Amino acid sequence: MGICVLDEGGLISISALSIFILAFFVTFVHVSFMVWYRRKEGLAFSNITVILDHLLSSRSNDK
């Protein structure tokens, strides 16, 4: 949606097909990271808030 807003505002010029390809790529990277992290940490729930909470709490425990 952000890309569409920038395109409509005239800040960038991108074709409609490129918007879908870029959105697919960003979604693919996001889902791949979430699946990898869930498997790595053995988390039972794949909710983004659970994963972020686990990630942030494990970082604070390292210090």
Image: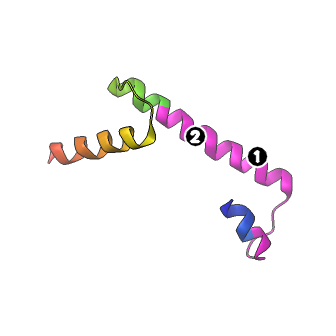
x then y, percent, for residue 30: 55, 41
Q: Which mark is residue 21?
A: 1
Tell which residue pokes out farthest to the bottom in this image: 10
Number of marks in picture: 2
Residue drawn at point x = 77 percent, y = 54 percent = 19
Residue 51 position within the rendered picture, expressed as x and y whole percent measured from the top left:
38, 38
In the structure shown, which secondary structural element does the residue marked by tag 1 occupy?
helix
Q: Tell whether position 33 is magenta.
A: yes
Q: Is residue 35 left or right of residue 19?
A: left
Label 1 packing within 10 angstroms: few (<14), some (14-19), many (20+): few
Please state which of residues 49 and 20 is positioned toward the viewer in this rendering: 49
- Which comes before the other along the chain, label 2 or label 1? 1
**Residue at position x 41%, y 24% in the image:** 39
Camera-side residue: 22 or 50?
Answer: 50
Dot label at residue 29: 2
Q: What is the magenta range? A: 7-34
